[in-house]
Image (cartoon, rainbow, N blue to C red):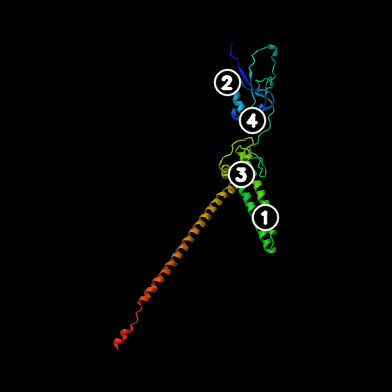
């Protein structure tokens, strides 16, 4: 008696918590195939993924599919029974391809003929003011630079408005209005900045809620560097296709951060050098003044010693 063989069948069901896009991508990677070919398996019909397997081999395939999010199952391979009554004559057109002549498309051994599902886009659509989508490292830096360049003039304008109002009216109303405008601008800046961070987290395949790590002391100061350094997923993930390629404008805006860091470093170095030079100059002048004051005190006794002493009265009387 021959060993019983098994098949791995799939009818489009997924494990709980797995979305269709992720399952298609995982299955395409597992079978080393295109996503367009894998989409045909999600027609709802039962298809056989692997045939003529031993029980151990079938169990290994099933575990691999479950890790990909596919809710496949093992079925025993039916025994082969042939009957001439079931044979049907297949009519072929001369120009028809061999793949178009399938006798029984419902059979689990026949390739699926369901229409192809939704085609995944090669790149995702950019949505700057949204919590959906993905952006890469350079685009994250470029968008943040644009946001900062847009906020700085608004903050300067609010400060000028508050100062002008205060000088003109001699009241604190200008400060209050300027403070409210500044608060509104900062809140809008923070909201848009959070959206950029969430999209960058999506590019890494992480949940956007991980942005809350920025609020954790000490760890929050390191987490932004992870968003800048860590590379995103090369292909599609559960948050959609990869972002479009970086344009020249994106690269130039991202490079402005390097220019700004260099300028800040030079300004800091110049400030430190100027402070040291000022301290050195004040120390030298104080030492010079102290040396002059000590020289004056030494010269006065010498001058007094050089003056001749007046003759005594007794000496003058003897000469007379």
Of labels 3 and 4, earlier in sequence is: 4
Dot 1 crowding, Cα within 10 Å, few <14, some 14–19, many 20+: some
For residue 23, the mark is: 4
Q: Give how far apart the Cα atoms at labels 3 and 4 are.
A: 34 Å
Q: Is residue 50 above or below residue 281?
A: above
Name the residue tied to disc 1: 179
Nearer the observer, 214 or 148: 214
> What residue is at 67 percent from the left and 55 percent from the top?
179
Name the residue tied to disc 3: 215
Nearer the observer, 42 or 147: 147
> What residue is at 43 percent from the left and 69 percent from the top?
293
Residue 162 seen in this snapshot: yes
User: Helix, strand or loop at disc 4?
Assistant: helix
Instruction: Kindly indicate whether the residue at mark 4 contacts the one at mark 2 (C-beta within 8 angstroms).
Output: no
Q: Position of residue 86 (x, y in %)?
A: 70, 14
Of labels 2 and 1, earlier in sequence is: 2
Q: Where, by quadrant of the figure, is residue 194 drawn? A: top right
Residue 246 seen in this snapshot: no
Q: Nearer the viewer, mark 1 or mark 4?
A: 1
User: Helix, strand or loop at disc 1?
Assistant: helix
> What residue is at 39 percent from the left and 72 percent from the top?
299
Q: Is residue 283 above or below residue 122?
A: below
């Amino acid at each position: 008696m021959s060993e019983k063989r098994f098949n791995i069948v799939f009818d489009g069901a997924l494990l709980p918590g797995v979305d269709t896009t992720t399952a298609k991508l995982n299955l395409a990677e597992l079978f080393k195939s295109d996503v367009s070919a894998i989409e045909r398996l999600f027609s709802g019909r039962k298809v056989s993924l692997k045939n003529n397997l031993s029980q151990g081999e079938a169990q290994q395939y099933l575990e691999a599919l479950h890790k990909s999010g596919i809710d496949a199952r093992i079925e025993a391979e039916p025994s082969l029974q042939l009957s001439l009554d079931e044979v049907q004559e297949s009519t072929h057109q001369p120009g028809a391809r061999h793949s178009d002549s399938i006798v029984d498309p419902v059979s689990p051994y026949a390739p699926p003929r369901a229409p192809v599902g939704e085609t995944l886009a090669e790149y995702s659509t950019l949505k700057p003011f949204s919590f959906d989508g993905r952006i890469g490292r350079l685009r994250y830096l470029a968008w943040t630079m644009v946001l900062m360049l847009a906020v700085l003039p608004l903050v300067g304008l609010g400060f000028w408005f508050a100062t002008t109002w205060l000088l003109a009216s001699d009241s604190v109303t200008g400060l209050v209005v300027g403070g409210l405008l500044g608060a509104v601008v900062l809140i809008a800046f923070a909201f848009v900045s959070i959206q950029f961070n969430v999209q960058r987290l999506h590019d890494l395949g992480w949940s956007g809620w991980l942005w809350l790590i920025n609020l954790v002391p000490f760890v929050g100061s390191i987490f932004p560097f992870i968003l800048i350094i860590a590379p995103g997923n090369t292909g599609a993930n559960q948050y959609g296709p990869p972002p479009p390629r970086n344009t020249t404008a994106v690269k130039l805006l991202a490079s402005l951060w390097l220019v700004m860091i260099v300028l800040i470093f030079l300004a800091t170095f110049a400030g430190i050098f100027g402070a040291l030079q000022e301290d050195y100059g004040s120390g030298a002048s104080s030492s010079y003044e102290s040396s002059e004051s000590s020289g004056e005190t030494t010269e006065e006794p010498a001058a007094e010693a050089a003056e001749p002493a007046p003759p005594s009265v007794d000496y003058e009387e003897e000469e007379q």
